[in-house]
Image: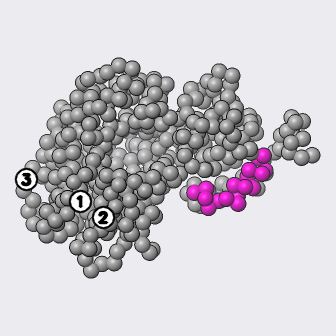
Amino acid sequence: MDDKAERNSGKKKTVSACDVEALKKCLEEHKGDYIKCQSQIEAFKSSCSLKKPSDSHPADSSYKDFIGTEGVFKFIFYAPEVYMTPDESSMVVSERQKHIFIKLGVLLVYKIIALVKAIGFRSLENLPKYCQPFSSFIMPASRTSVQLPVFDVSKSITPSSISSLSLACKEWGFFHIINHGISKDLYTKLRFLSYQLFSLPYELKLKAGPTSNTKTYTPHFIASPFFESLCVSGPDFRASAQSSVEALLNKPNSEFCEVLREYGGKMRSLSKKITEILLMCLGEDFEREFKSEFSKCEGYVRINNYSPPESRMMGKDVEGLGMHTDMSCLTIVYQDDVGGLQVRSKDGKWLDIDPCEETLVVNIGDLLHAWSNGKLRSSEHRVILKESTNRFSLAFFWCFEDNKVIFAPDEVVGDELRSYKPFLCSDYLRFRENSERGKFEKVGFTVKDFAGIGG
């Protein structure tokens, strides 16, 4: 009996355990990189009788807008047994689909849930209860902290402080700053106003989500089950905040917008100052010689809210945001006293960056790392959730303009070999956004993958 006749008869093929296990093994070996598992995918498609996406599928256009690339998720999500209820309020999963979920395990299930949520389905009640996506985020416990240097940005830079900063940027790519001009009152106010928005019903928050016109809200399950965020972009931070608020509340919130205007402006000034200091680390008079290279940089604020893990997970380190590097020149982070930020050392160990009152964390991003020919390190980092309470943080990303060609000047390269070929900033951002690993930031691609020269 052929496939068509079998479908017409109402019978369903059983999943070949061999094919499912082969795909699962390949994906685990390659960290979810489906491109390296094409033969296993084809075998999986064939054994499961999965059909390709079609324009008639009720979620097709939203799915394409959200993912924007081919992926393993298509072959699972578009199985014939997954369909919408007549009111399009929930997803129905057949017994055979549950079998596929069980076979594939948590590696893909949390990403399927992310997809379903992001395109606006309001109920996940019919997903199999025995799928436990959270377990894939439990990490080995880590209780060792790194002692990063602290720099007073209100004082003049001395040769000694430049030497210390240069060492920190080469070894860690992270350091602390104090006397930065951002008051505790401003942080308290911004946190309070942000929680009002994060406390909105899920359906309302999706009005600014990935498939909306605004696209400033990142819901849970995109980066991790515990992480959600709201993005506010410069140079007009007030207008950007206003567009998000109006999408979420259908009315203005002048206080939130004004606080973001003030915070964004202070962060812009602070970023310019830190950039000049970092140029001093690369060479004498470099801040004057190459300041113009950064004259068109702009920034955006990402307001992050981390939900606490379930009580059964407490006592373990749960990954709130997976390992990644930042797609920026530099990033300035405020983290509350809950903590959880970790940096990965050169020998692969995870070390805590403990929160310190009225102190901000600064880290080098991929763009400045490439521009400095790797002399300023862009380190992998992550967020671990250790307490049964919400974690709040603010990350300000200072970036080159999209049409900037990033190429380390000869004076910066010096006698070393070039580590990176020239590339357009927007091309790199597109590369990161279009890759499954980059998009979900579980094990993200870096600028070395995109523009690195040699091994």
Per the rendered image, the range of residues in magenta is: 33-49
> Would residue 200 be found to the left or right of residue 368 on screen?
right
Q: Choose the circle earlier in sequence order: 2 or 1.
A: 1
Q: CA distance from mark 2 to mark 1?
A: 10 Å
**Callout 2 touching callout 1 (CB < 8 Å):** yes
**Callout 3 touching callout 2 (CB < 8 Å):** no
Snapshot quadrant of residue 100: top right
> Would residue 78 be found to the left or right of residue 189 on screen?
right
Q: Is residue 370 above or below residue 218?
A: below
Identity of the residue drawn at 86% across and 42% down: 4
> Would residue 103 be found to the left or right of residue 249 on screen?
right
Kind of residue indicated by mark 3: Lys
Secondary structure of residue under mark 2: helix
Image location (x, y in percent) of residue 362: 25, 52
Secondary structure of residue under mark 3: loop
Q: Choose the circle earlier in sequence order: 1 or 3.
A: 3
Kind of residue indicated by mark 2: Trp
